[in-house]
Image (cartoon, rainbow, N blue to C red):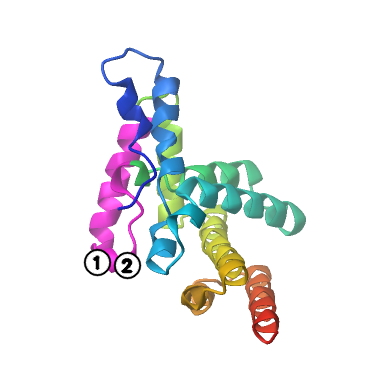
């Protein structure tokens, strides 16, 4: 698992600090954690996004798309979901399919991490419940955010393809398309594919 720096929470060892300060230092690890899938596809470390970068991109996409086309969905809930859905990776790391970790085991480890992280802050149980709702796809909001999360990876793949002419990222198109059911999101993915195809011919 490649990282920029070790978990900043370790710098607080032995100190008594406010739980929110401790939470932020743990959260900051997502800024240090590379998105491992890009590294595996040849994106150099000095160009590779972090998990926190991905969360930012997903949150902005969710905000703009939902506010423009899906006013019936609870935007406040969705933004909370998208911002916390990767927090289990603070302890587990950014696991990829190449790690060959059993899906159920991965979920169990992430859940334990999320419980430990959020149990330290006020109203932590609310965030744990939201994380579970997202993971289980238990609401229209959760289903939408799961798809936006996957779509954001395809957006980033196109950016990397155009920036570095890296053809290894192209497998994100079929992978993402299989996981989308929302018509608007599928259209956006198809538009991304068209951009890729157009620039590839130049």
| Position of residue 46 measured from the top left corner of the image (x, y, whole percent) | 48, 53
Q: Mark 1 and mark 2: span between their CA atoms?
A: 5 Å
Residue identifier under label 2: 97
Q: Is residue 98 left or right of residue 31?
A: left
Vertical placement of residue 119 versus 146, above or below? above
Residue in the foreground of this view, choosing between 102 and 17: 17
Q: Secondary structure at mark 2?
A: helix
Task: For the C terminus, give its image quadrant.
Answer: bottom right
Report the label total.
2
Q: Residue at x 50, y 45 (%)?
A: 52
**Left or right position of 28 against 14:** right
Question: Which residue shows up at 47% across the image and 42% down it?
Answer: 84
**74 lies above or below 164:** above
Q: Residue at 68% across / 69% down in the picture?
A: 184
Farthest residue, direction bottom: 201
**Disc 1 target residue:** 100
Secondary structure of residue under mark 1 = loop
Q: Is 89 drawn above or below residue 154 in the view shown?
A: above
- Please tell me which residue lies in front, 164 or 49: 164
Q: Which residue is nearer to you in this view: 164 or 157?
A: 164
The boundaries of the magenta stretch are 91-118
- Quarter of the figure with residue 106: bottom left
CB contact under 8 Å: marks 1 and 2: yes
Question: Which residue occupies 48% across, 56% down?
Answer: 48
Residue 129: horizontal and vertical position, in percent? 42, 41
The crowding category of the residue bearing disc 2, from other C-alpha atoms within 10 Å (few below 14, some 14 to 19, many at least 20), is: few
């Amino acid at each position: 698992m490649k990282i920029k720096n070790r978990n900043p929470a370790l710098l607080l060892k032995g100190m008594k600090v406010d739980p929110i300060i401790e939470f932020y230092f743990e959260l900051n690890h997502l800024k240090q954690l590379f998105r491992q899938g890009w590294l595996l596809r040849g994106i150099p470390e000095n160009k590779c996004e972090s998990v926190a970068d991905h969360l930012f991109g997903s949150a902005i996409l969710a905000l703009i798309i939902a506010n423009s086309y899906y006013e019936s969905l609870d935007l406040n809930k969705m933004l909370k979901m998208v911002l916390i859905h990767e927090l289990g990776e603070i302890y587990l790391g950014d696991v990829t399919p190449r790690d060959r970790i059993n899906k159920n085991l991965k979920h169990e480890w992430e859940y334990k991490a999320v419980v430990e992280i959020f149990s330290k802050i006020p109203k932590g149980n609310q965030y744990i419940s939201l994380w579970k709702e997202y993971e289980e796809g238990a609401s229209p909001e959760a289903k939408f955010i799961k798809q936006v999360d996957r779509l954001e990876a395809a957006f980033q793949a196109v950016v990397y393809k155009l920036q570095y002419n890296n053809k290894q990222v192209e497998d994100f198109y079929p992978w993402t398309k299989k996981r989308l059911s929302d018509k608007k999101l599928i259209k956006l993915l198809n538009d991304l594919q068209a951009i890729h195809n157009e620039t590839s011919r130049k």
